[in-house]
Amino acid sequence: MPEISATLAAIAVAAAMFAVFVLALRLRRARREFQEEVRSWKSRLAEDLKRARHERDGLLNALAEAFLMVDASGSIRFANQSAIRMFGGRQLLDRSVPEVMLDHNLASAVLDCLHTGLPVSRRIVLQNSPSPSESRPSVVFDLDAAPLPDPVGGDPSIRVVIRNVSAEHHTEQVRKDFVANASHELRTPLAIINGYLENLIDDDLIEDPAMARRFLTIMRKHTERIARIVEDMLVISRLESGEAAALKIEPFRMRSCFQDVLERLESVIQGQEAKVSLEMPDPELNFCGDRFYWTQVLFNLVENALKQNPRKGLNISLGCQRKDDALMLWVADDGVGIPSQDLPHIFRRFYRVEKHHSQDQIKGTGLGLSIVKRAVEAHGGTIQVSSTPGEDTRFTIRIPAQAEESLKSMVVPDPMPLNVPA
């Protein structure tokens, strides 16, 4: 019996050891499977995170605006492609805001949001002119910064959106300047007219025919000036409301356009004893465009030459020909010329070149050359000016062949007549 008991005990011990061994194997297998599952889960999580970041980066890189993420220490943690382009392709990540945003106004707006935890929205104008004598358009940004929801146990961070609104700002500034200049230009002749009316009525000068006629003559000149300003403003408004849509494209002979202009200015040309020469190798040269605007362009250029050079014997040269796969037009004179400092600005609205000989005359509207430039650009062309005082002041217009072909495609054919039976 003791031997049986010993045997049974040995068997029990062996069975227990076997059970422990089997259990250890199972635990080992379970641990291995668990570890493999954890690795698989981590791999899937990393892949999902990578995919989510890729999608996020793709969406943010598709934004036209610059997008930045800044951590609590003021370092940039993310920058989309627009931000990289905006800052000239420089390294942005892991750099501080003042290092990246060299302009104090930009950097301070971001740091204010970071320190206060409040949203910040500012318009920042960066002056682009190195000196007062140089006039370059400024760069304007709309900056919007706001805190991001704090991550669990993490430091607060902010997102920054920067939008370049230079074009909108400049357009708005042009509108404001236009209204201000137009108001000033209209107020001056109106004040003169009102002054003469008061003299005529209050001082009983209407009883003096000679004095009344003199006053009325001056008033008529200023009313003509007001009418011209209004007409020129309407022309510019039409062109800028949608330049191509404002054009009435049709074929016409360029020579007839020149002749119309010279007929309208014939009395001024004769009065100043000016000599006008027209150079057109092809008298039958046709062009597709808005004849009204081309007459306006040539009229303004020739009239400008006559007004700026009231001396006797001025020589004016007009011309038109096809050259180097483009239509070239020019108006030149041998008058006093345009000072070099004025050349970059002469196409601006209401800009005038001050000259001693015109101080006692009724001023022009200051819109003529602005109309010329916009009308030429509406036809897909360019205009340049060069001036050697006393020798040659030349306005040159170039209409490329592709622009002319585009204008031809806009010609509306005449409707076919209907054959109605009698």
Image (cartoon, rainbow, N blue to C red):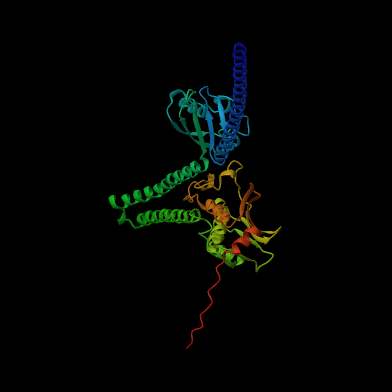
Nearest the camera: 46 or 349?
A: 46
Quadrant of residue 206 within the rendered picture:
bottom left
For the residue pair 107 and 137, the one nearer the viewer reads as 107
Counting from the top left corner in percent of width and height, residue 171 is at: 49, 45
Q: Is residue 12 above or below residue 374?
A: above
Name the side, left or right, on which 57 lies relative to 123: right
Q: Is residue 131 above or below residue 294?
A: above
Residue at x 55%, y 59% (from the top left corner): 299
Q: Residue at x 53, y 74 (%)?
A: 415
Q: Viewed as shown, does residue 205 lie left or right of 168?
A: left
Residue 176 in sight from this viewpoint:
yes
- Residue 414 at x, y percent in the picture: 54, 73
Q: Is residue 101 visible?
A: no
Locate the N terminus and report the quarter of the image it occupies: top right
Q: Position of residue 259 (x, y in %)?
A: 58, 65
Q: Position of residue 42 (x, y in %)?
A: 59, 30
With 139 as the anchor, is 207 left or right in this view?
A: left
Q: Nearer the viewer, residue 193 or 17?
A: 17
Extreme bottom residue here?
422
